Amino acid sequence: MQTSPIRSDDPQAAAQLQAKITEAEKQQTIMRVANRIVRNAKLGDEVKIVQIAAACDMHHETARRLLVPDDLGRTGFPAYELTNNAANIRRLQKRLAEVTREKSRSSVTVRFPGGRMEDHAEDARIRIYHEAKPERPVIEALKGNGFHWTPSLQCWQRLRNEGARWAAERVTGVKWPRDENPGATAATESPRGVPRI
C-alpha cells in the first residue's frame, strides 16, 4: 500500500488515486455491512460473527472484536470512522478530477513586459522567464509564491496547478487566457513593472 503522497506530475497519478478511491469505497461498504449485522437484534453473537466474516471477508477473531463494546459502549465500527472515510473518498474524488483536468490542459505561453510565463503541460510546471535578472522585490515575490530558481532552464518554476497559475498572475500582473481557448499563446502588455505582492 502506497504511503507517499501522489504527485500530480506522476504519469500514474490518476490510476493511483482511483485505486485509493476503490479501496476506500470497499472499506466503507465493509463497515456498513458489518454494522448492519452487529446491530441486528434477531441474531446471536456467534451467528453475527459467521455472517460478518463471510460478508466482509474478515477473520473470525476480527469479526468477534466488533461485538465487544468500546469505552463508550459502542459496538461495530464507530460512526466517526465511516464519516472520516466518506470524507476521504470525497477528497480523493476531487483530487482525481483536478488531476484529470490538469492532464487535459494544453501548454500556454503568456508574454509580459520583460519576460514570459509558461504553463508547460508535458513537464507539469508553471515557469516564469525574465529577460534580465529581476529586482529583489520580484525575486521575493516569486519565492513567496512558491517558485524556485531552476538554473538549468534559467527560469522560476513550480508544480503546475490552479494555485501555481494564480501565483504566476499575482507575480507578473498578467492573466492567463481563459478556458475558452486554453491552448492559445497569448501576448499581453501590462503597464505594471512591479509585481503585485
Image (spheres, rainbow, N blue to C red):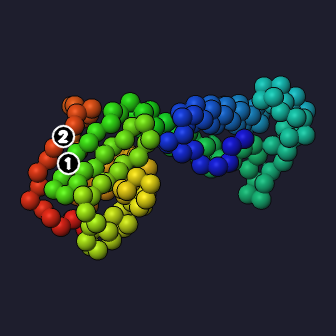
**Outermost residue toward the bottom?**
136
**Residue 194, visible in the rendered structure:** yes
Measured as percent of width and height from the top left, residue 124 is found at 43, 42
The amino acid on which the numbered mark 1 sits, given as a three-letter code, is Arg
162 vs 78, nearest the viewer: 162
Label placed on residue 120: none
- Tell me the kind of residue under disc 2: Ala
Q: Residue at x 74, y 34 (%)?
A: 34
Total numbered labels? 2
Residue shown at 31%/54% (left/top)? 128
Disc 1 secondary structure class: strand
184 lies left or right of 163? left
Q: Identify residue for label 1.
A: 111
Query: Hey, which residue is sitting farthest left in the picture?
Result: 191
Q: Can the viewer see residue 170?
A: no
Crowd around label 2: few <14 · some 14–19 · many ≥20 (10 Å):
some
Could you tell which of marks 1 and 2 lies nearer the N-terminus?
1
Q: Position of residue 142 (x, y in %)?
A: 33, 64
Give the residue displayed 33% in from the left and 33% down from the top: 106
Q: CA distance from mark 1 to mark 2?
A: 7 Å
**The N terminus sits in image quarter:** top right
Relative side of 106 to 83, left or right? left
Instruction: Give the quarter of the image for residue 51.
Output: top right
Which of the pair 41/176 is nearer the observer?
A: 176
**Circle 2 is placed at which residue position?**
186
Q: Is residue 44 above or below residue 191?
A: above
